[in-house]
Image: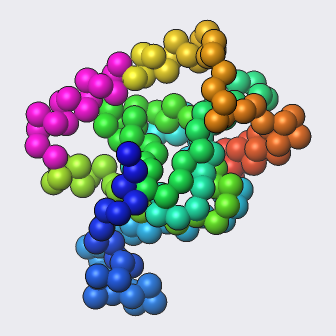
Amino acid sequence: MGYKNMTLQTPHSPQSPQSPQSPQSPQTPKMLIHLAPDEILFNEGDLDSDLYLVHSGRLLVFVTKQSAITPLAYIGPGEFLGELSFFDHGPRSASAIAIEKSDLIKIPLTEINKLLPPWMLLLAKFSIKNIRLIDSVIKDRGIKKKTESITPLPIKEQSRIFHLTKNKKTSD
């Protein structure tokens, strides 16, 4: 289930008194992220822990093994990404790149304690621990059953994305 109909108060939302042109107050975190096509949101192994909600556009989530790019999911409006690192503070398990112009709402890690009760955070961390375990098994052994919705990328596209991620890592 997506969250397309969820109303969020962000610094640039119509319900907010600020418009995109007005400066944000010093205490307001930058919450709206604009990505151009081919712009990388994060790389596998990165240590940041922010959660993102896609407002518009489409992103590809993928893993890299040597120079092979394996697509895991296409993420669109109303869907979250970055939830593993958000809850367990571990490194990113995959990379994410915009495949079209995209707007995301960034939910900083610091906000989670304000929003969720402690028991829910504990449940999330336990669930994420199990997901990370399954994730490592899949990385080691591969997915035995191909899904119809995620097809392998052509070699030329894998190469293009590989070079984009490699360039981002060297510029950081």
Horizontal side of 133 relative to 99 (left or right) equals left
Q: Is residue 100 visible?
A: yes
For the rendered model, the colour scheme is rainbow
Instruction: Judge whether 32 appears above or below 45 on screen.
Output: below
Horizontal side of 84 relative to 38 (left or right) equals left
Q: Is residue 49 visible?
A: no
Find residue 133 and report its horizontal and vertical position in percent. 42, 16
Horizontal side of 171 relative to 117 (left or right) equals right
Find residue 27 and report its horizontal and vertical position in percent. 26, 73
Instruction: Judge whether 151 appears above or below 130 on screen.
Output: below
Q: Residue furthest top?
A: 141
Magenta range is 116-130
Q: Residue at x 72, y 33 (%)?
A: 151
Q: Residue at x 33, y 32 (%)?
A: 88
Q: Residue at x 60, y 51 (%)?
A: 59
Find residue 41 and report its horizontal and vertical position in percent. 57, 52
Find residue 3 and report its horizontal and vertical position in percent. 36, 55
- Quadrant showing the N terminus: top left
Instruction: Judge whether 5 appears above or below 85 on screen.
Output: below
Instruction: Judge whether 30 appears above or below 22 on screen.
Output: above
Q: Is residue 148 magenta?
A: no
Q: Residue at x 44, y 68 (%)?
A: 32
Instruction: Report how many numbered discs are placed on residues in the image.
Output: 0
Q: Residue furthest right?
A: 156
Q: Please state which of residues 163 and 75 is positioned toward the viewer in this rendering.
A: 75
Magenta: main secondary structure: helix
Q: Please state which of residues 143 and 42 is positioned toward the viewer in this rendering.
A: 143
